[in-house]
Amino acid sequence: MAVNVHFTGQTTDNLSRIELLAWINRTLLSDFKKVEELCTGAAYCQLMDVLFPGCIPTKRVKYCTNVEHDFLSNLRMFQNALVQQKVDRSVPIERLAKGRFQDNFEFLQWFKKFFDANYDGKEYDPQAARNHVPMGYGTPNTLRPSQKLNTGSSGGSGAAMKRANSNGSTSRLQAAGKGGKNPVNEQKAWEKISTLASNIDDLTIKIQDAEISREYYYKKLVLIEKLINENPEDGQDAFCCKVKEIMYATE
């Protein structure tokens, strides 16, 4: 369980925006240029993984993006991790995702204090943890999916060709390959896969949110049930009976 901290902007020991941004980039080997760019939520997700390993599904984090849809996805994962660790600080997801300086700066000030209160000093390789994906605001300077496919499949194609030759089916392989690959169709296919994967991520996060909400309200109902089952004060019997009737109704 996390150590909770309470933050007020009136204290004199707060770091400047330059110092806070330098801390983020130094800790995560990231490339954020402005505090506003932390609206992506990726930095918070990985810093939670530093503090509480396994609390964030790191493979689903969008580490380098400039799309608000991805910001919201990252920030929801971050919020869920805080809830799991019993942190009593809410995340202003919508405000952070808008990328306004003041909202992101104030939240970053709180998170730095939270991090310092919970960090145990263990070593952590941020680049290895995110499979060497660049982190920052924008589009990662990497190969497009279609280029990755062509590069990664070259060795496999050679192996397949050797198997075909050994089985005497070279002619069939050549016939199948005459048409060649269609880069446009290939790119569209990868874009569709990316969209579907993003939809799956959204649904997974919604399920997690629903489970957290269900648990939260269930605990509230248990407390209410305990309260009304205790000896009620004079004149409250009818009220307690009505509450029970509502709670235990099947429709």
Image: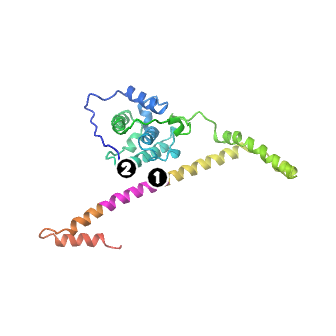
Prevailing SS of the magenta stretch: helix
Q: Is residue 215 magenta?
A: yes
Classify 44 as above or below 237.
above
- Which dot marks residue 10? none
**Is 244 left, or right, of 55 in this rendering?**
left
- In which quadrant of the rendered image does the C terminus lie? bottom left
Classify 30 as above or below 205.
above
Amino acid type, mark 2: Val
Q: Quadrant of residue 92?
A: top left
Mark 1 or mark 2, earlier in chain: 2
CA gap between label 1 and label 2 equals 13 Å
**Is 88 left, or right, of 55 in this rendering?**
left
Q: Residues within 10 Å of mark 1 (few under 14, many from 20)?
A: some
User: Residue visible at 35% across and 47% down?
Assistant: 1
Q: Which residue is mark 2?
A: 83
**Is 194 left, or right, of 166 in this rendering?**
left
Q: Which residues are magenta?
A: 204-219
Q: Position of residue 56 (x, y in %)?
A: 46, 46
Q: Which residue is mark 1?
A: 205
Q: Quadrant of residue 218?
A: bottom left
Q: Nearer the viewer, residue 49 or 234?
A: 49
Q: Is residue 108 magenta?
A: no
Q: Position of residue 78 (x, y in %)?
A: 42, 45
User: Residue visible at 76% across and 44% down?
Assistant: 157
